[in-house]
């Protein structure tokens, strides 16, 4: 469908998202400010969630120079016009009447805005004042689209008429031409400029689960670390990751970010996305020792990722070491050159987009500029249907929404509960996440809010009314009209987990009032459950073993959310057994299920109240199959990208434990060998020992 639309006319889209990630307090925000031309404030200014900066800088397509854009001249609508004006198919241009080329000007890219045209970008995108884009797909050529829409909605004609009064298109062909010519004539110079959009990710642990929503292979990643510390030096006063009982070090955080990026970003092109390492705090190193420290740091980075399966994504030949508080530091310019080079090498830079999409993109940009953040699907369909330049049929509109979602321009989940609305301003999702998934430093000051956040931090739970109260705050009131839809998105992403309850008499599902927020649980398991209850005499276990040494926290958090939605959380010693990277749920009166993270493993235990020998094989097999299916679903979720097939290889494999619950053998090997002697305990285990996990194979043998 996309190829067909491209054949009817296209333009090149020059946008690049620079995702700036890393441990907290390493200077990410200061670095971004220097890159976009802002002054760096004194003292540490931590980021609450994710900060997005756009319209501040870009790249000259022809000279590859870094361009600063006056923020007073930035307008989202003009960005769309500008991109289209930059490029067009030669056959489209040949249909236009050529006009003489304007003389070049020596004016600098950042200029004071024209008083009569405060919304026009000062970066010009064409060498012709003519309208070069062929938007020839008109309703008259596609009558089926309008007919199919009107037929489907004939029953709601009165409602449709009301909507038409509310939603009037501004994007006539004459209006688009007029606006584009206005952009063409507004600047004193001409320049093809691609946009750089910076996403500054908060480094505190509680934010890690939310990052999955915004990461994409259509981006360049900067992983920032403190170069004044050795990679294996302990980072004090910091919570590490769920179940990671290792000492938190810069190396651990570097591994986390690389593994997270490659987990969340589907690999569509070999070696893409690229990950660039940037060391900061150069000012803390004596000048005479800087080069020695640089060589040492990057040799440690090279060694850390030696043999890592994602090594081809890592940019290891650019050893950047900056002072992120000094705009005069020459290495800031070196970093800009590195970003420029990697951007121009990215396969999505200059990606062709259909001209047929432009009118609807402009309509949406107009609404966003006016403060609109969410549209119903019906409103989007109507916005498309009343257009006078290009009307997409229903299938084309569906592809438009899915592809715009993959580009990060909108948020649209094509599932039964979520497809009725389209978030046209993705920044709303940033605000949604920030509203309740936030570091203690940013908790609201009101006593009532403080109590809500304290309960959530202690128990990992929040009730529906508490969430509504949070959204009633001034900063988040835009969420309120769509609160049920937003709730469903948060459940879909497993940021919230609903613990299902059923009426024992009727079997019907009971309303859910309380939700778990696993990523807000930072307390470690301090109960005696594992020592007293989950013992070799009463439990069996297997492990999901991941390739990386650090598992992205969102993976175990999503698995914990899934467990909460299926089974009842267990209480023990007066505590609900949910902690950071650890949960115990009750399957029935005799069987408990434990899920916990240890190193690069998510370990599953089935515990019997009296003896491991009494564990019902059908229960063990069912629990295993349920969680394997869930982990496959979670893995698929992170790999999903529009029009791209998922990888057949999962990021984990299964291991079975020995009778002491400490040594492990891979499932593949265990099912092919007659006996196995574990290295540590020298105990002999036979093939039948693992049939408790595989009752389906017992049936096959019978």
Image: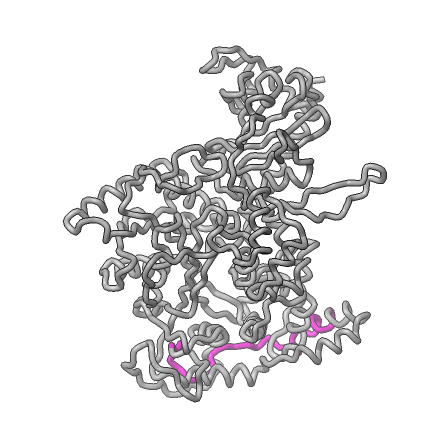
Residue 211 painted magenta: no
Answer above or below: position of 408 versus 299. below
Tell me the residue at 58%/32% (across/down).
595
- Between 545 and 80, the residue placed more toward the observer is 545
How many marks are shown on the rendered structure? 0
Residue 367, by quadrant, is bottom right
Q: Locate residue 193 relative to residue 160 in the image: left or right.
A: left
Answer above or below: position of 285 versus 171. above
Residue 130 painted magenta: yes
Q: Does residue 624 appear in the picture of this structure?
A: no
Quadrant location, the C terminus: top right
Tell me the residue at 24%/58% (across/down).
331
Quadrant location, the N terminus: bottom right
Q: Locate residue 220 relative to residue 531 in the image: left or right.
A: left
Answer above or below: position of 642 versus 531. below
- Which residue is situated farthest in the front direction here? 447
Magenta residue span:
123-148
- Which residue is situated farthest in the left direction here? 288
Residue 674, by quadrant, is top right
Q: Does residue 383 appear in the picture of this structure?
A: yes
Tell me the residue at 60%/16% (across/down).
537
Tell me the residue at 65%/33% (across/down).
571
- Between 432 and 520, the residue placed more toward the observer is 520
Q: Main secondary structure of the magenta part?
A: loop
Q: Position of residue 214 (x, y in %)?
A: 50, 55
């Amino acid at each position: 469908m996309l190829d067909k639309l491209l054949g009817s006319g296209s333009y090149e889209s020059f946008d690049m998202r620079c995702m700036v990630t890393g441990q907290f307090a390493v200077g990410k925000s200061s670095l971004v400010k220097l890159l976009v031309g802002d002054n760096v404030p004194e003292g540490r200014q931590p980021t609450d969630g994710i900060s997005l900066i756009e319209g501040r800088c870009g790249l000259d397509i022809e000279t590859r120079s870094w361009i600063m854009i006056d923020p007073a001249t930035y307008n989202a609508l003009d960005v769309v016009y500008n991109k289209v004006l930059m490029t067009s198919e030669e056959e489209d241009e040949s249909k236009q009447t050529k006009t003489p080329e304007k003389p070049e000007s020596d004016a600098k890219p950042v200029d004071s805005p024209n008083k009569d045209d405060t919304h026009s970008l000062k970066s010009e995108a064409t060498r012709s004042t003519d309208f070069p884009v062929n938007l020839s797909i008109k309703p008259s050529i596609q009558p089926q689209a309008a007919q199919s829409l009107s037929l489907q909605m004939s029953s709601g004609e009165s409602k449709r008429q009301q909507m038409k009064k509310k939603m009037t298109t501004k994007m006539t062909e004459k209006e688009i031409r007029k606006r584009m010519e206005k952009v063409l004539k507004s600047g004193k110079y001409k320049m093809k400029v691609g946009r750089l959009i910076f996403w500054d990710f908060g480094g505190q642990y509680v934010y890690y689960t939310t990052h999955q929503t915004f990461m994409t292979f259509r981006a360049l990643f900067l992983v920032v670390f403190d170069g004044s510390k050795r990679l294996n030096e302990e980072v004090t006063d910091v919570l590490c990751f769920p179940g990671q009982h290792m000492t938190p070090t810069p190396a651990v955080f570097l591994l986390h970010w690389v593994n997270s990026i490659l987990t969340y970003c589907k690999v569509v092109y070999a070696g893409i996305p690229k990950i660039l390492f940037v060391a900061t705090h150069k000012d803390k190193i004596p000048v005479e020792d800087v080069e020695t420290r640089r060589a040492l740091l990057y040799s440690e980075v090279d060694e850390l990722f030696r043999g890592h399966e994602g090594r081809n994504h890592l940019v290891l030949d650019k050893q950047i070491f900056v002072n992120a508080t000094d705009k005069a530091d020459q290495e800031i310019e070196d970093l800009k050159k590195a970003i420029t080079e990697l951007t121009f090498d990215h396969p999505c830079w200059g990606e062709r987009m259909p001209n047929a999409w432009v009118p609807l993109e402009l309509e949406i940009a107009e609404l966003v500029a006016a403060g609109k953040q969410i549209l119903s699907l019906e409103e989007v369909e109507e916005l498309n249907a009343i257009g006078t330049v290009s009307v997409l049929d229903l299938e084309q509109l569906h592809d438009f929404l899915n592809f715009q979602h993959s580009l990060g321009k909108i948020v649209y989940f094509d599932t039964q509960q979520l497809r009725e609305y389209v978030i046209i301003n993705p920044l709303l999702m940033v605000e949604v996440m920030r509203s309740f998934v936030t570091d203690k430093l940013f908790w609201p000051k009101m006593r009532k809010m403080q109590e809500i956040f304290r309960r959530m931090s202690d128990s990992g739970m929040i009730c529906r009314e508490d969430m509504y109260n949070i959204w009633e705050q001034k900063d988040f009131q835009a969420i309120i009209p769509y609160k049920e839809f937003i709730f469903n998105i948060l459940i879909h992403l497993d940021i919230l987990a609903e613990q299902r309850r059923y009426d024992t008499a009727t079997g019907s599902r009971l309303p859910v009032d309380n939700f778990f927020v696993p990523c807000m649980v930072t307390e470690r398991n301090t109960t005696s459950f594992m020592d007293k209850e989950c013992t070799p005499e009463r439990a069996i276990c297997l492990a999901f073993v991941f390739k990386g040494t650090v598992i992205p926290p969102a993976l175990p958090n999503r698995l914990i959310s899934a467990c909460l939605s299926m089974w009842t959380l267990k209480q023990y010693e007066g505590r609900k057994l949910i902690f950071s990277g650890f949960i115990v749920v009750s399957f029935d009166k005799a069987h408990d299920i434990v899920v916990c993270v240890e190193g690069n493993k998510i370990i599953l235990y089935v515990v019997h109240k009296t003896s491991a020998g009494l564990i019902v094989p059908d229960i063990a097999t069912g629990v295993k199959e349920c969680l394997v299916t869930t982990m496959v679903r979670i893995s698929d979720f992170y790999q999903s990208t529009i029009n791209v097939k998922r990888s057949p290889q999962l990021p984990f494999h299964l291991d079975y434990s020995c009778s002491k619950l400490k040594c492990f053998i891979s499932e593949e090997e265990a099912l092919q060998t007659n006996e196995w002697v574990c290295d540590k305990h020298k105990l002999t285990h036979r093939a039948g020992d693992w049939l408790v996990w595989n009752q389906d194979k017992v049936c096959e043998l019978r």
